[in-house]
Image (cartoon, rainbow, N blue to C red):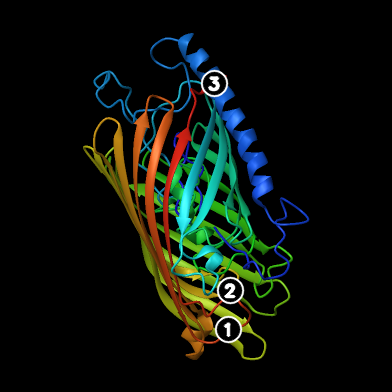
Amino acid sequence: MASVAFAAAEVKPSRRIRPGPTARGTEDPVFPGGEFNVRHGKCLLVTLLGLAVWLTVCGIAQAQDTSTAPAGGPSQSVGNTDQNESSAPQEQPDTHPLAGAYLSTLGSAPELHSYLQPFFSIGELLETSPYNIPGTHGQLYPITVPMVGVELQVLHPSNDFSLGYQGGGFIYDNGAAPGASFHTASIMDSIQFRRGSLTLEDLFSYMPEAGFGLPGAGMFGGLGVGSFSGLGLGGGAAVNPAFVPNESILTGRYGAFNNTALIQGVYELTGRTSISAMGAYGFLQFNGSSQGFTNGNDYDGLLGLNHEISARDTIGVSYVYTSFHYDGSPVSFTSQAADFTYGRKITGRLALQLYLGPELVTYKDPPVGTLQSVYASGMLSLTYALGRNGFSLYGGRFASGGGGVINGAETTMLSGGWHRELTRTWMSDATVGYSLNSTLKSALLSTGQHYDYWFGDLTLDHNIGRYVRFYLGYEYQRQAASGTCNGAVCGLGFNNQVFGVGLSFTPHPFAL
């Protein structure tokens, strides 16, 4: 289904998986005893509609009691670019270290007050291949996608706390396939010290298929799964995909839990030089009915040195160690990467981040032994704003856990996005993504599996007043697979198209 962009507060992150209607064991753990069906969906839809109306009325009432400028909450500049432009507060610069867990950003609008921001959307889709079921091509299957979200920001002079949640479901109106729910959540606490900072974050998602390019939800203002969004969850900056359990292989539908907990510290040695350290633990766990997938976990550690050579340019070096393990399998491997890093930031205009260096992979498979190989690894993250246009580009090559499909993968990921404000109330977004996953064993032993997957989507949205947006979208997905594999999770030569419309409701934020 399509990527989802949270209208007012992006809780990112970066999924679909579940067998067809004739398969057994399709219970959704959130709805035990059976699939998320039309009856469940209608009850949820009525409840969410009532909640959306109540929040909208409350938000309007609160807005009438405040001054022209909102007292708190996220900045809502879209559709108001010509209003008080000269007096608008300047954006705050991105302070994440060059060598660290997060991708660089253009900065952020200053938030002066704590707030609670609710969100609701409803979408109607037509999909050509629901659940990746063979034999369903050539028809259009209607789907209803209700979604609700909330973001909490609590601000203090030296401490920022944020909590976000988004969830909803895919309801197949004609019973062509079992329904499914999806959920993402993030919690982050950032503490500032006189000469450093400490960030703690936990990112969670339950998705019914691979989150990279998830169709259906992304078109209509919800989960951010296109471009950088699906590469990592969490408000603000996205986590580098190399530190999040990888889900970039398109499969049939099976529920998957993805969680990453990380801690990052930065200490300033001088006014221009700092050291950074990061530790993370992540796991990818499939529900009990997801036969053929492999549960896995990984441990990540990073040490970095950053030096500002000018007000805009930073160079550095980093060392990253990662260990991958799989439940019920003797296979494991480690990767060690030493990277040269370069970054350039112009607040509100440009954010560039570049890693490049060798990666040593040590692969342990008892029947074969221990094998080692050196790869060229790297990462490019670029965000650029020019007038009414915004561009984003990501590229990465690294060893990953294999998304539950293969035990160890050499992964290449590319994604790009273009956002344009056509008028004060009309906007368009185009996103493309590509991933290539090959087994590490294929690189070491010249045998194995390969998965080529790409997607593209185009959305058009229109602001209807201050609180409502209308969305129109299209997405195309295609995957080719080669090699031998086990179970029903691979060997997929697959393509899918999704058409849809939707409405998003974002009431006035509640100042705290």
Q: Callout 2, which amino acid?
A: Val
Could you say where residue 118 lies in the image, as x and y percent from the top left? 55, 30
Q: CA distance from mark 2 to mark 1?
A: 9 Å
Q: Nearer the viewer, residue 329 or 478?
A: 478
Question: Upstream in the sequence, badge 2 or badge 1?
Answer: 2
Identify the residue under disc 2.
Answer: 405
> Is any part of residue 435 visible from this angle?
no
Q: CA distance from mark 3 to mark 1?
A: 51 Å
> In the image, is residue 423 above or below residue 69?
below
Mark 3: give few (<14), some (14-19) or many (20+) Cα within 10 Å.
Answer: many
Mark 2: give few (<14), some (14-19) or many (20+) Cα within 10 Å.
Answer: many
Going by the picture, which residue comes out furthest to the left? Answer: 387
Which of the 4 image quadrants contains residue 274?
top left
> Is any part of residue 336 visible from this angle?
yes
Q: Nearer the viewer, residue 479 or 414?
A: 479
Label of residue 485 in the image: 1
Question: Upstream in the sequence, badge 3 or badge 2?
Answer: 2
Label 2, secondary structure: give it. loop
At 51% across and 40% down in the image, what residue appears?
122
Label of residue 510 in the image: 3
Quarter of the image where the C terminus is located: top right
Label 3, secondary structure: give it. strand
